[in-house]
Image (tube, rainbow, N blue to C red):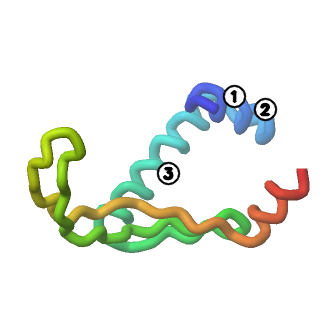
Amino acid sequence: MTTKELIAAITQETGMRKNDVSKLLEATVQAAKDTLIEGQSIQIQNFGMLEVKTKKERAYVHPKTGERSVVPEKRQVGFKQNSILKDAINSK
């Protein structure tokens, strides 16, 4: 689903104007990004949790050249689905 399709679905479900839904979605995404950048998690009831995880620095060997290097530590977003979402997905 694209952003445009999501906006259309929300518009149809709520009866709100597309412009208002678009602004609301942009604000929601920005608030989520800001929260994750701060290292905090986001819990959405009946959906799941987004959280920042840190992957440790690790050694890497290029398979073709055999060159060794180090992959630096990095942060990435992980998603844990809620049991309600899990059940809904698996029931169909």
Residue 84, percent across and down? 79, 68
| Residue marked by disc 2 | 12
Above or below, 41 relative to 22: below
Find residue 28 and name its label.
Answer: 3
**Front residue (pair 33, 79):** 79
Q: Residue at x 59, y 26 (%)?
A: 4
Crowding at dot 1, Cα within 10 Å, few <14 / some 14-19 / many 20+, comes out as some
Q: Residue at x 17, y 58 (%)?
A: 71
| Residue marked by disc 1 | 8
Q: Secondary structure at mark 3?
A: helix
Q: Callout 1, which amino acid? A: Ala
Tell me whether the residue at label 2 lies in contact with that at label 1, contact meaning CB atoms closer than 8 angstroms.
yes
Residue 24, percent across and down? 54, 44
Q: Residue at x 56, y 31 (%)?
A: 3
Q: Callout 2, which amino acid? A: Gln
Decide if residue 70 is on the left or right side of residue 63: left
